[in-house]
Image (cartoon, rainbow, N blue to C red):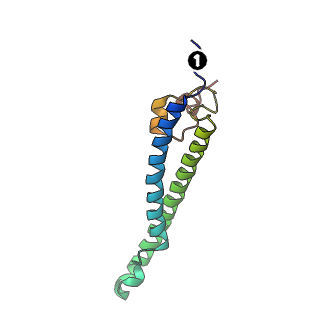
Amino acid sequence: MAEKTRYSDAELEEFREIILEKLAVAKRDYEMLKGGVTNADGNDTADTSPTFKVLEEGATTLSKEETGRLAQRQMKFIQNLQAALVRIENKTYGICRATGKLIPKERLRAVPHATLSIEAKQGGAK
């Protein structure tokens, strides 16, 4: 029997469902992080008394910087998931870009936006 070169439409649909679920959670988390950076809830050092303001300003700045970095990472994750949906539409999803072989289902279930097999990621692909 010849080696499979792509996942079936039914298998691709299974992966689409996994990705859509992760995408919904990722977008919700991104909005929450973005709200922390933009202070959408209105709670900031300006809401506290002047005594605590000096102590909180430094911590607030560091916290917003960290939240901003997390939001950027989350946006990249969202973009990777969206790119995976495009690969599903093109029926190229799950094919290792280094080896051309199918990425194992277990890896795709854990990291649905993966474009490399473990072997290729670790540099063992030839």
Query: Residue 122, relative to residue 77: is it above or below?
Result: above
Name the residue tied to disc 1: 3
Q: Residues within 10 Å of mark 1 (few under 14, many from 20)?
A: few
Residue located farthest toward the front when viewing the structure as drawn: 10
- Amino acid bearing label 1: Glu
Residue located farthest toward the top when viewing the structure as drawn: 1
Of helix, strand and loop, which one carries label 1? loop
Q: What is the quadrant of the C terminus in the image?
A: top right
Q: Identify the residue at horizontal 47%, vertical 63% (top origin).
A: 31
Residue 107 image position (x, y, % from top left): 48, 33
Q: Identify the residue at horizontal 64%, vertical 27% (top origin).
A: 100
Residue 48 image position (x, y, % from top left): 36, 84
Residue 69 image position (x, y, % from top left): 51, 60
Query: Residue 36, relative to residue 106: is it above or below?
Result: below
Query: Residue 117, relative to residue 81: is it above or below?
Result: above
State the count of labels.
1
Residue 7: image quadrant is top right
Residue 58: image quadrant is bottom left
Residue 123 image position (x, y, % from top left): 59, 30
Q: What is the quadrant of the N terminus in the image?
A: top right
Front position in the image: 73 or 14:
14
Front position in the image: 1 or 45:
1
